[in-house]
Amino acid sequence: MTTRNQKLQAWLDEVAHLTQPARVHWCDGSQAEYDRFVAEMIAAGSAFPLNPARHPGCLLYRSHPTDVARVEHLTFICTRNRHDAGPNNYWMHPAEAHRRVDALFAGSMQGRTMYVIPYVMGPIDSPYARAGVEVTDSPYVAASMRIMTRMGRPALELLDSAPDADFVRGLHCTGDLSPERRFIMHFPEELTIKSIGSGYGGNALLGKKCHALRLGSWQGRQEGWLAEHMLIAGIETPEGEIHYIAAAFPSACGKTNLAMLVPPEALKGYRIWTVGDDIAWMHLGRDGRLYAINPEAGMFGVAPGTAAHTNPNALAAVQHDAIFTNVAVTGDMQPWWEGLTETAPPDLTDWQGRPYDPANGPAAQANSRFTAPVTQLPCVSDQVDNPRGVPISAILFGGRRASLTPLVLEALSWTHGVFLGATVASETTAATIGQVGVVKRDPMAMRPFCGYNFGDYFGHWLGFAGRSDRLPKVFHVNWFRKDDQGRFLWPGFGDNLRVLRWVLERCTGRGVAVRTPIGYLPTPDAIDTAGLHLSPEAMRVLTSYDPALWLTEMDDARDYLRNYGDRMPEALLAEVERIRSELRSAA
C-alpha cells in the first residue's frame, strides 16, 4: 500500500527521517495481517495465546510493570496561548514540546518496523467521521487499533479521496519505557499527537482518548459539535419504541454497566441496545435534534469487577477474538481477574507471570483490560454504523455521592443542565486514597480528556441553546445514596432501568415530578419499585433534598467554577446564584 495524499506522504517522510526505522509496513486491516501481528508478539514473549477451545482467537498481552495506566502528569496540551489549554490541563508551549519530544524520537525506531496505521473514527461513510494516521513501532498497538477503529485500506482510500482534508497525525514509539522519558503531547492547533515511552492503552492507542476526546473536543468546538466521554444506548419499550440516551459518569460510577444493562424480570419487554460504551460525538441534525455517533469500533474495558452478575453482555463479548492486557491466567490458560469468580482458581499465574501469591497483590492488575469489537456484544445496536447517528432524547450526568444528591433529577433548563454537568462530583472512598468523603469535581466526566480550557468548553455547551429549541432534556443520577448505617438505598445494576423509564416519561411529557431549586424531582411514587421491597422512607430519602446541605454545595460549586477566571461563562455563575436564592427561600 502507498498513498496519493501528498500531505500524508510528506509527513511520513519526515517521521521516517526522524525515527530511522529498519522497515515500513502499511497496515491494510486484514485478518492475515492481524495474525502476523499476534505471531510477532508471541515470538517476542510479550503475548501468549489463550485456551483455543474456551477462548478461541484470544490473546494475553503483558505490559511492563511500570507501564499500566494513563499518566496524566506527563500528558500535555500544547497551545501557543497557555490560557487556551486552561488550568484543567498540563501545558507546554508547542516549540518547547516539539523540541523535547523530538529529541527522544530521534533514531527511536532503529532496527524496528514502523507500522503506518490509517484509520477512521466513526462509521467510514459518515459525514461526522474524522480520519487519522498513527505511526507506531508496536504490533500490540497495530493489532489493537484494528479492533478499536476502522483501520486499513478503506481508511487510506478515504484519505486519498480528499487530499486537502485535515487528518490527525499521531506519532508513537514505545522507546525504552522509562517513566523519565515518557510524554504524551497534544498539539490541537496542528491536529498532531506525539507519544513516547509507553506502550499501554490510551497512551499508545492514539485514536482513543488522544484523538477522539482531547483533539476531538478541540475540533468539535471549532466545527460546532461535541466530543464527549459518554455512552450511547437505546432503550426499547415493550411497544417497540426506541429512545436513545447519552450518559457521562466518572470512573467507578457504573458507566459500562449502564451501557450494557440487562433489564430486571419486573420490566419484561424492555431492551437495552448498545451503540457505544465510552465516547460519543454529537452533532445538531437538520431537524434541530442532537445526533450521536460512536467514533470507536471496539471496547477497551476494565476487567476487574466484570462478571456474569455485573455485566453479562461484556463478559459474553470477550469469549472469543479479544485481547486481554495484564489479567491473570488459570492453569489451562483462561483469563481471570478479581470479581470474575468468588474465589481464585488453583494454579493461577498473576499478571506479571508469577505464581499467584496474595502477598504480591491482586492476581490481575487493577487497570487490566479487555479489547474486543463492539459488534461482539449480544446487545449491540443495529444503528452502530448508522452514518447519521442516533437522535438523543436525554443526556445523563452522574456521580457517586453517599448523601446530598437525589437518585435522579431533571434540569430546569439547558443552562441548568450544563451547570449540572460542569459540577459533577464524586466522593472518594478509603480504598482509593485513605479518606472517606473527599469530593472531587469531574465536569462531564471530561477532567482528564478535555483538550482545552473548561471555561471555553462550558461556553461551547451553552451555545447550543441559541442554535436549537429541540435539545435533549438533561438529568443527573446518583445510584450510590446511602442510609445512616452506610447501606446503599438503591439496588442499582439492572434496576437502574426503573429510573431510565421515568427519564423517558419526562422526555415524552408523562412523568410525574415536582419543581425544586435544584431541579425537577420525581415524587416518591413516580418510579416503579414493584418487587424491590424498598420502604416508603427509603424512596422519600432518594427523591428529596436538604436545602441547607445544598447551600453548602453551591458555595463549593461557585468556588470551583471561579477557578477558570474570565473564561468562565457568566451564565453558569448566575445559575449558582439562582439556585442559592431559591434554596434560601426553601430553607
Image (spheres, rainbow, N blue to C red):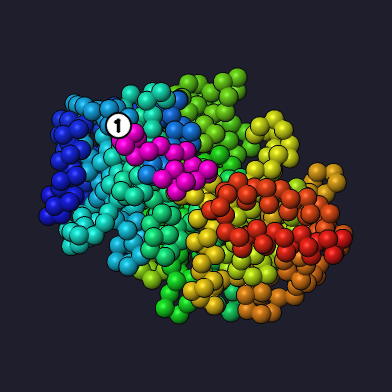
Instruction: In the rendered view, tell whether residue 339 sits above or below residue 405.
Output: above
> Is residue 97 located in the magenta-colored stretch of the structure?
yes
Q: Position of residue 164 (x, y in %)?
A: 20, 60
Q: Residue 573 placed where, x, y %?
A: 65, 58
Three-letter code, disc 1: Arg
The residue at 44%/43% (across/down) is 82
| Front position in the image: 227 or 389 | 227
Q: Identify the residue at horizontal 15%, vertical 47% (top origin).
A: 9
Q: Alpha-carbon neighbours of circle 1 within 10 Å: few (<14), some, or many (≥20)?
A: few
* Residue 448 makes an appearance in the image: no
Q: Say if residue 578 shows up in the picture.
A: yes
Which of 316 and 125 lies nearest the eye of the viewer?
125
Above-or-below relation of 551 to 63: below
Horizontal side of residue 286 vs 341, given as left or right: left
In the rendering, at what x and y percent does residue 190 appear?
A: 30, 48
Quarter of the image for residue 431 reads: top right
Left or right, 458 with respect to 111, comes to right
Of the 4 image quadrants, the one containing the C terminus is bottom right
User: Residue 393 in the image: x percent, y percent?
Assistant: 55, 72
Q: Residue at x 38, y 57 (%)?
A: 219
Segment colored magenta = 81-98
Is residue 136 positioned above or below 359 on the image? Answer: below
In this rendered view, identify the residue nearer to me: 208 or 356. Answer: 208
Residue at figure coordinates x 32%, y 67% from the top left: 127
Task: Reply yes or no: does residue 317 show up in magenta.
Answer: no
Q: Which residue is mark 1?
A: 99
